[in-house]
Amino acid sequence: MSFKAAAVQMCSGVDPARNVETMAKLVREAAAQGATYIQTPEMTGAIQRDRTGLRSVLKDEANDIVVRAASALAGELGVYLHIGSTPIALSDGKIANRGFLFGPDGGRICDYDKIHMFDVDLENGESWRESAAYRPGTTARVADLAFGKLGFSICYDVRFPELFRQQAVAGAEIMSVPAAFTKQTGEAHWEILLRARAIENGVFVIAAAQAGKHEDGRETFGHSMIVDPWGRVLAEAGPTGEGIIIADIDTAAVHGARAKIPNLKNARSFVLDEVTPNGKGGVAA
């Protein structure tokens, strides 16, 4: 199955209404260029480090303006619109970092909550504790769509290859990695992680990213990217600025790559054995 895929690059601010306007403009541009699957980045609706301020602008899913706008856009344009994620208020006071996929009729196909929380301390002094505000997801997801099987992830999930492997074993041919990678970690690992996930699973990877300096003071890496199953970068955006990238996707390339390197078929179960020195120069199980 062949189709055009687009990744939308944004620099979301603290106001969901302004972010929706930007999203709608870019999605329309992508559809006008023939894209039938369009992905937006992580935290499309709002990026704000101040948790109190963020909670003050959030709504539950039924009343979220990103969700409403995306459903209407998908139906109007006749496209699959994947909101990489947007923050959703939960009844327990926590926030869901939730992605949504809408079909060409505007109906919601599925959602996905980010599983792995970004709880890290970086060398430049940045400290992140997503788990303090966000409720992690517990369910991986693969959607069987008209153009192929799509696996879901969000940002930090990309560092957990077992998630992608399970999706590939379940038949995923395209994997999504919408993100808001920090500039520091993006410079170190963004491209190599995306290409690795594509190569080791024989899949296309589509990764829409946040890019540039945001209103809340953070800086994200950008470089939205589409990668083929052989690890080749088909399209890449710059480090800053809004925009779209588009690539032709042919899922036959997935099966071609897996035929050449059949690592999914060749995988074997094994037992891990830890050994310790026995004090005589050898090892004992």
Image: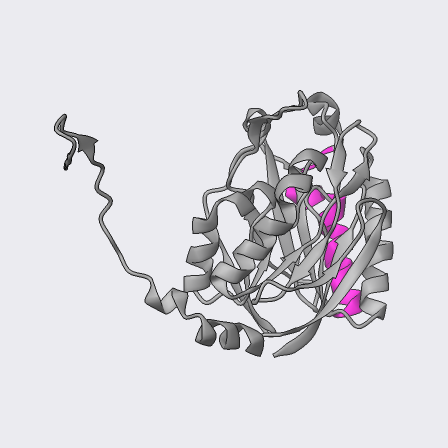
> Is 25 situated left or right of 8 in this image?
right
Q: Position of residue 164 (x, y in %)?
A: 48, 54
Q: Is residue 172 depicted above or below 256 in this figure?
A: above
* Quadrant occupied by the N terminus: bottom right
Q: Colour scheme of this structure image? A: one colour
- Please tell me which residue lies in front, 50 or 184: 184
> Is 33 situated left or right of 273 in this image?
right
Quarter holding residue 181: top right
Quarter holding residue 88: top right
Q: Position of residue 81 (x, y in %)?
A: 70, 60
- Please tell me which residue lies in front, 241 or 261: 261
* Quadrant occupied by the C terminus: top left
Residue 113 makes an appearance in the image: yes
> Is 82 situated left or right of 282 in this image?
right
Write the start and end of the magenta stretch as one range: 58-78
Q: Is residue 138 depicted above or below 107 in this figure?
A: above
**Residue at 64% across / 50% down in the picture?**
191
The secondary structure that dominates the magenta segment is helix
Q: Position of residue 182 (x, y in %)?
A: 69, 36
Q: Position of residue 7 (x, y in %)?
A: 73, 58
> Is 96 situated left or right of 162 in this image?
right
**Residue at 59% across / 38% down in the picture?**
96
Q: Is residue 231 depicted above or below 95 in this figure?
A: below
